[in-house]
Image: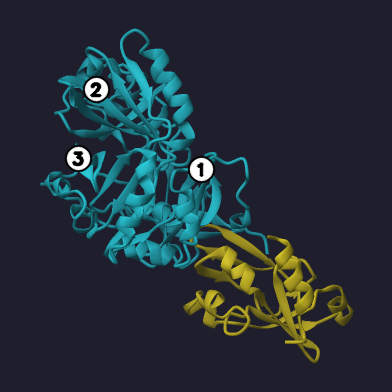
Chain colours: A yellow, B cyan
Amino acid sequence: MANRKYTEDHEWVEVDGDSGVIGISEYAQEQLGDVVFVELPEVGKVLDRGDEAAVVESVKAAAEVYAPVSGEVVEVNDDLNGDPSLVNSDPFGDGWFAKLKLSDADELDELMDEDGYKKFVEGLG
Amino acid sequence: MTAAASTPADADLRRTPLHDLHVDHGGRMVPFAGYAMPVQYPDGIIAEHKHTRAAAGLFDVSHMGQAILRGDGVLSAFERLVPGDIAGLAPGQMRYTLLLNDAGGIRDDLMATRIEEDGADALFLVVNAACKDADFAHIADALAGAAELEILEDRALLALQGPKAEAALSGLAPDCADLVFLQGADMTVDGTDAYVTRSGYTGEDGFEISIPPGAATALAERLLADEAVAPVGLGARDSLRLEAGLCLYGHDIDETTTPVEAGLAWAVGKRRREEANFPGAETILAQIADGAPRKRVGLLPDGRAPVREGAVIRDAQGEATGTVTSGGFAPTLERPIAMGYVGAAAAEPETRLEIELRGRTVAADVAAMPFVPPNYKRA
């Protein structure tokens, strides 16, 4: 997936034109364990890069998910309300969190690509 | 994303005799009370939790403190430190009790079993891992001259919990079926001398098996070879005990909480109340008579979002009345549950409260505990 970019905090953004879908990585879902609740942002909310975009609750703990890029929330994945475990079973697909209308496409250049992220995760031991 | 769960295990951590077995079974090792312990295995916390309720889970609790207290009159001597009726224990009988401070606060909670060694009374004690050094120093010091404490430093402790625990263990230790809840006995388990109690921390029927460290891995593998038995980590141990309404020391009880506030007044024996000769008796007996200013209660938050330890609890008027001390997701009930302390006026079941959550509040009902009915073998 050439157009998926990653943060060091294990969020991803997959860009299509001027919008981007965001979620958390396979590594992140595995670290969290069973996800039991996801608090999604409201549609219309404007996020700066690094703002808290969502909260993921696993059985044990809550984790904050940060916006990998800046933009306005135009859609959220309501399926997560009924089945939060989609984050575990399909983190890059049905477990997506929100779609943003990007406000600064240049920010993407500062994120890791697939290979860069893979090396980053390997480096975490 | 930031998650507390991503803390790596530290090389300085102590290891239990089952450490390599955990790693072999894919356990994710995390620091806990100075030990590297498995928080979960590849199946995950929810699957491990449900397996324990449906079949049997095997837990390594070797990090807990085990010791034997000996001496003439040891049962009465130990009563100087705890409010439980220890002198009234029958041989092989086990009791939940509390080490108290002079203000009536709880230094630790523990299990005490009356055992017999060559006809002499002794007590087998199991205390919390995080408290064990302080507990054992306190017991040895306070009872110096009256009793002698032998710390079983490296001994392993396995817990086998769930409705299929008896079937799984009785193949290796047929005598285990003779025990009922809160009884213990010496027995041979798979050829090794062990001390087995019918007890646990999940609300399920089950056993705790105290064995020499060299025999622990072989026994665990024998038990895990039974398809009814799966390894279970600390994550599910916590969710199981929370559903069962059981306290976690350092969270739901500590030096600042009394047994009455904690809803543990049942652990203050009838004779002990009359004698009034345990630490903090004045405070505790006054609270038993007049009520405590605050109480530990169960909480059922509305909706799906778990509330966590430390969250402020507010009453119907919006006044802060206490805090959540344990909170999480209950796999059996598929909903969030919690426990915490509230003012006495807000402690009745079905009282409507508000709990702070990320800058807003969620409504919650005070609920009777346990959240999930226990499944003990009583007789």
Q: Which mark is residue B15?
A: 1
Parent chain of label 3: B
Crowd class of label 3 (few under 14; some 14 to 19; many from 20; radius 10 Å) = some
In the orientation shown, which residue stands out farthest toward the bottom? Answer: A17
The structure residue drawn at horizontal position 40% and vertical position 67%, both measured from the top left corner, is B47
Q: Nearer the viewer, mark 3 or mark 2?
A: 3
Parent chain of label 2: B
Crowd class of label 2 (few under 14; some 14 to 19; many from 20; radius 10 Å) = many
Residue that carries the numbered disc 2 in the rendered image: B122
Along the line of sight, which residue is nearer the eye, B216 or B50? Answer: B216
Asked whether the beta carbons under mark 1 and mark 2 sit within 8 Å of each other, the answer is: no
Q: Which mark is residue B269?
A: none
Q: Quadrant of residue A8?
A: bottom right
Q: Is residue A51 something that shows in the picture?
A: no
Q: Is residue A21 above or below residue B118?
A: below
Are tags 1 and 3 found on a single chain? yes
- Name the spot of residue B311 as percent of width and height, x first: 54, 50
The structure residue drawn at horizontal position 38% and vertical position 68%, both measured from the top left corner, is B334
